[in-house]
Amino acid sequence: MPRRTSLALSLLLVVAGCSASSATPSSTTGGPGPTTTIAEETTSTTPGQTTTTTPPVSTTAPDLSDVQGISDEVRAELEQLIRDAQEVRGLAFTTPPMITVVSDDELEARVRANIEEDQADFPADEALYKMLGLLNEDADFQQIVLDLYGEQVAGFYDGDTGEIVVPAREEGFSVTQRATLLHELVHALTDQQFQFNTPFEAMLDEDRLDEATAYQALIEGDATLAQVLWIQTLTQREIGEFMAESLTIDRAQFDAAPRFLRESLLFPYDTGLAFVQELYVDGGWDAVNDAYATLPGLPGSTEQVITPTDYTVDLPVEVTMPEVDVTGYELQRTSVWGEQGFRALLNQGSGRSTVAEAADGWGGDSYGQWFDGDNAAILIVYRGDTATDVAELQQALLSFAQEDFPEDHFAWVDQRDGALYFIASDVPEVGESIRAQVGLG
């Protein structure tokens, strides 16, 4: 599935959508004031149902007097948001957050530069997604990603530099923009406290992609929950403005993107929010804080995020990838496809109601991805929790191959020694070669 960009970019559409659907306050108060401690922190899974309380926390006083390119009004709003982020999250900045103000063009350029850091991967990934039928043959995968982020980014936290990058403006922020900036400030805050950027970058660099997706779900789910709690402190009028503005956000690029990409982009926010909420309900922010060290050490998987009761209990099994030599092709990467990857793959078909059931029994997998400059091939070796789980995924993959896979491509699904093998290639001879080398058929 798509390699995650190493920058914690906030998709305004996604964040606003998650917050709007989750923030249902039973009562409202005045807007957040310039306090230095928070006396009580609550959240509700249903209106009026208190689930947890956190103790007071000392906050770091913001000072943006040296920040250039913003008006006094904007400076005051940013300083208030820095206070709010600490209060709602129950943590204090160890050092004041770094605010970098850029023009709209500079913001776009920084977003583009970050995405293009992974541009060497785009041709092979594009070929893979086209081979699997996830992308149209004439699609430009890199341009689709650039268009998506160009449309939605209203500011971001740069984990490599520790900056909150915001566009220059004279007028104050709208409620939705303030919510987005608070989300990014929570990223800066939790990175200061738990240094999440270093293990996340290592996961990406080492192609531990399912693990990286799970960790990103914790990072984004954390900031989204804090955002939801912040929205619950707003006045009724501000909440109305937030909801109204959320409905006017331009979704054209997002709606036009391939389904698998939309689901992959949404996963860290919506499924991540549900995962973090589960931790928060059980143990407050302390449980969420502990997850920053616990999840990478398990190792983590998207299965644990999708089913929070599996967290720390149902650990992925290690699956060995057979040695395969694909003549004329380069092994692009070996990694773990993961439960979320199977859901995104199988979800592309219309009217398929068994996707979640088929993917739910994921126990572990390993895959190899090959590329020759034009064509792609993949081998996934999968193990389920039970023999029934293997059989269910086998049937789902067979249905996918028969109903959704490009007719002139090669697909093979088979079992051996309790493991499930899925082979796909847009050159049938290459697929047959992989099949023969792993001893299937």
Image (spheres, grey):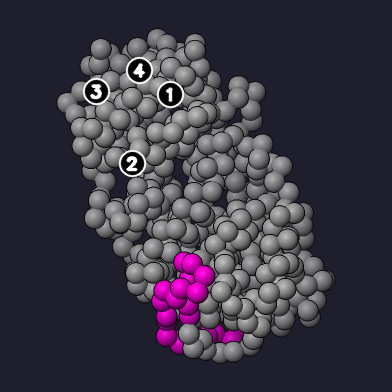
Question: In the displayed structure, does residue 435 sit left or right of residue 111?
Answer: left
Residue identifier under label 1: 400
Residue identifier under label 3: 415
Q: Earlier in the sequence, mark 2 or mark 4?
A: 2
Question: In the displayed structure, does residue 324 sit left or right of residue 243?
Answer: left
Q: Residue at x 44, y 33 (%)?
A: 353
Q: Earlier in the sequence, mark 4 or mark 1?
A: 1
Question: In the displayed structure, does residue 185 sit left or right of residue 253?
Answer: left
Q: Residue at x 31, y 35 (%)?
A: 366
Residue identifier under label 2: 360
Distance, label 2 to label 1, CA atoms, is: 17 Å
Task: Please say if the residues under marks 2 and 1 sit with CB atoms less than 8 Å apart.
Answer: no
- Element carrying mark 4: strand
Q: Residues within 10 Å of mark 3 (few under 14, many from 20)?
A: some
In the rendered structure, does residue 377 fall within the stretch colored magenta? no
In percent of width and height, residue 175 lies at 70, 69
Q: Residue at x 38, y 15 (%)?
A: 431
Q: Main secondary structure of the magenta part?
A: loop
Distance, label 3 to label 1, CA atoms, is: 16 Å
Q: Nearer the viewer, mark 2 or mark 3?
A: 2
Location of the C terminus by quadrant is top left
**Badge 2 amino acid:** Asp
Numbered circle sitting on residue 412: 4
- Element carrying mark 2: helix
Distance, label 3 to label 4, CA atoms, is: 10 Å
